[in-house]
Image: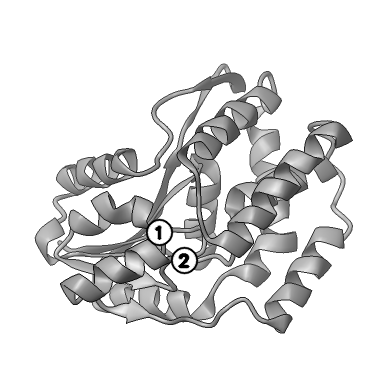
């Protein structure tokens, strides 16, 4: 069996899924307005610099597990679904979805692999008709989040390790499989498959791709239409929990 593994942030999705989840969580009252600048600054920096800092990823993971501590897992899942429908769905890159469906049409599995929470990765995979999603897993006990992680944040080598483990469990031949990402931090993931692809890569990954002859997908950029969709989604009324 072969598969395609697709990063979410700035690959399948324009921007950061954690930013959108944070905004939606604030709109639903999960944390105070005092925390909002943290999401805004980190989200805007990620949009415009295309750089994700490892310390930011760890801090976001710690903060995310803190604000959902004690909350009902089904409630969080419903909220994630509203955030997806109200904001995230409009920002999914149709050209990457088409690439993914090409893999499905050839009988290959398609997995999302992301730093984003496991629930969001799985939800996006389900809504898009993909095989499944891998993400950072928060601990749940008796149906409620504990405020602790149940494993590593899937970033860099940890994401690649999760993909390698999944492949071994499902009998996927990584030497014949594909991976897609925009970031140099996903070099371990891209290097673990026989067919790495880069999508709108940041500068460091572009240099590496050119040196190694990897395909570069110049999918549509962050234009006026996408900016309008983002603004509309951020201000759209949220359903009640």
- Mark 1 or 2, closer to the camera: 1
Write the residue at 22% across / 40% down.
165
User: In the rendered image, which quarter contains the N terminus?
Assistant: bottom left
Instruction: Give 194 or 79, whichever is nearer the viewer.
Output: 194
Percent of width and height locating residue 128 = 50, 66
Quarter of the image for residue 143 reads top right
State the separation of the CA atoms marked 1 and 2: 9 Å
Colour scheme in the image? one colour
Residue 217 visible at all: yes
Tell me, for residue 11, which label it has, or none.
Answer: 2
Residue 15 visible at all: no
Mark 2 Cα shell of 10 Å, populated few (<14), some (14-19), many (≥20)? many
| Residue 43 position (above or below residue 216) | above
> For mark 1, what is the residue?
183
Sequence-first tag of 1 and 2: 2
**Pointers 1 and 2 in contact (CB under 8 A)?**
yes
Write the residue at 72% across / 82% down.
224
User: In the rendered image, which quarter contains the C terminus?
Assistant: top right
Percent of width and height locating residue 122 = 48, 49
| Residue 73 position (above or below residue 51) | above
Percent of width and height locating residue 235 = 87, 60
Query: In the structure shown, which secondary structural element does the residue marked by tag 2 occupy?
Result: loop
Quick check: 209 left or right of 138? left
Mark 1 Cα shell of 10 Å, populated few (<14), some (14-19), many (≥20)? many
Quick check: 65 left or right of 97? right
Quick check: 223 left or right of 141? right
Quick check: 86 left or right of 63? right
Instruction: Give 155 or 93, whichever is nearer the viewer.
Output: 155
Write the residue at 63% across / 32% down.
64
């Amino acid at each position: 069996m072969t598969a395609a593994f697709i990063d979410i942030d700035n690959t399948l999705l324009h921007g950061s899924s954690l930013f959108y989840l944070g905004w939606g969580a604030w709109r639903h009252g999960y944390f105070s307005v005092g925390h909002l600048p943290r999401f805004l600054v980190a989200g805007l920096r990620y949009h415009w610099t295309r750089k994700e800092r490892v310390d930011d990823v760890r801090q976001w993971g710690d903060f995310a597990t803190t604000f959902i501590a004690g909350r009902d897992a089904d409630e969080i899942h419903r909220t994630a679904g509203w955030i997806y429908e109200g904001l995230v769905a409009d920002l999914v890159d149709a050209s990457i979805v088409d690439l993914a469906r090409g893999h499905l049409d050839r009988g290959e599995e398609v997995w999302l692999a992301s730093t984003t929470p496991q629930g969001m990765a799985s939800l996006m995979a389900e809504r898009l008709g993909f095989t499944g999603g891998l993400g950072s897993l928060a601990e749940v006990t008796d149906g409620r989040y504990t405020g602790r992680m149940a494993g590593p944040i899937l970033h860099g080598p940890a994401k690649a390790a999760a993909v390698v483990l999944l492949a071994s469990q499902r009998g996927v031949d990584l030497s014949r499989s594909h991976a897609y990402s925009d970031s140099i931090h996903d070099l371990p993931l891209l290097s673990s498959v026989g067919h790495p692809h880069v999508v709108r890569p940041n500068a460091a990954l572009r240099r590496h791709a050119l040196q190694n002859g990897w395909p570069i997908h110049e999918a549509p950029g962050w234009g006026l239409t996408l900016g309008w969709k983002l603004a509309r989604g951020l201000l759209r009324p949220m359903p009640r929990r």
